[in-house]
Amino acid sequence: MAPFFRMEIREMLKMMRPSFPAIAVMAWILTVSGTPARAALEIQLSTDGVNYTTETNPFTGSFGGYKITNLSATSNSPGTPSLADEFGADLVITNLTATTHLFIKLGDTDFTAPTTPPNIVMTSNIGGTVLIPDSNNTLTFQSYVDSGNGQNSTTGITTGPQNPVITGGSFNNTQTMLITSLSGPYSMTQYFDLFLSAGSTFNFSSSTGLTATPEPSTMVLTGLGALGFIGCGLRRRKSRGN
């Protein structure tokens, strides 16, 4: 083959050969496209507690006669061996023209930790303020952990309904329970049933958390180990004194 043609072929092969960065990008695209995405945090709103609309996170707008400003949800899914948490917050909710309740669900899925053993303490908290009080305002708040990993699920493990008084001023309510058995993946959901009288204004901060706690046997062994170290230290001091 003539030298001229051999040179042309070599140049064509160089042009066809992908660079290392290009290969890396292609591999990343294939990896990401082949990996199923984890379900994102979801905010759902309803005026009848049955038919829900999924909204953006955070959400600002009007819904069913309520004006909502910066309703948001966050979580640490998939969790850590010591903690799984979900938080909700809203800057302000005002009843403009509403004659019905406002139902809210904040939820996330695919928590894999913590699970038992050891035991887990579930804590559910809701707090906030009512800026324009009214004796007819009501709130029911409830946290759920669903071992079926359902998005915005209101079934499974729960600390029970919480009914803080929101007729005026500030409020805070916390409930806890011990979970002795749980496997992942699981979901966490916060559920709100809120009613505000016309013109009343409300804001809140909420949290649902699962905290791993040592088993009693582990605590006993830890205590015995600490006593052993103390005893060893006392013997050393005594031998030095002699």
Image: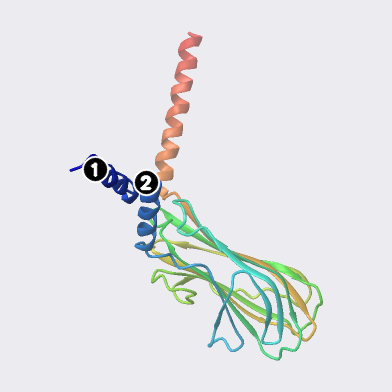
The answer to which image quadrant residue 235 occupies is top left
Front residue (pair 198, 145): 198
**Which is closer to the viewer, label 1 or label 2?**
1
Q: Residue at x 24, y 45 (%)?
A: 5
In the structure shown, which secondary structural element does the residue marked by tag 2 occupy?
A: loop
Would residue 109 be visible to someone looking at this image? Answer: yes
Numbered mark located on residue 195 in the image: none
Q: Mark 2 = which residue?
A: 19
**Amino acid on which disc 2 is placed:** Ser
Q: Residue at x 78, y 80 (%)?
A: 200
Judge the density around disc 2: few (<14), some (14-19), many (≥20) Cα neighbours within 10 Å: few
Q: Mark 1 = which residue?
A: 6
Front residue (pair 113, 163): 113
Would residue 183 be visible to someone looking at this image? Answer: no
Q: CA distance from mark 1 to mark 2?
A: 22 Å
The answer to which image quadrant residue 170 occupies is bottom right
| Label located before the other in sequence (1 or 2) | 1
Going by the picture, which residue comes out furthest to the top? 242
Going by the picture, which residue comes out furthest to the bottom? 99
Please say if 7 is above or below 133. above
As drawn, is 224 to the left or to the right of 137?
left
Front residue (pair 167, 219): 167
Please say if 137 is above or below 24. below
x then y, percent, for residue 139: 66, 78
x then y, percent, for residue 96: 76, 85
x then y, percent, for residue 52: 54, 84
x then y, percent, for residue 82: 47, 51
For the N terminus, the image quarter is top left
**Amino acid on which disc 1 is placed:** Arg
Q: Residue at x 82, y 77 (%)?
A: 132
In the structure shown, which secondary structural element does the residue marked by tag 1 occupy?
A: helix
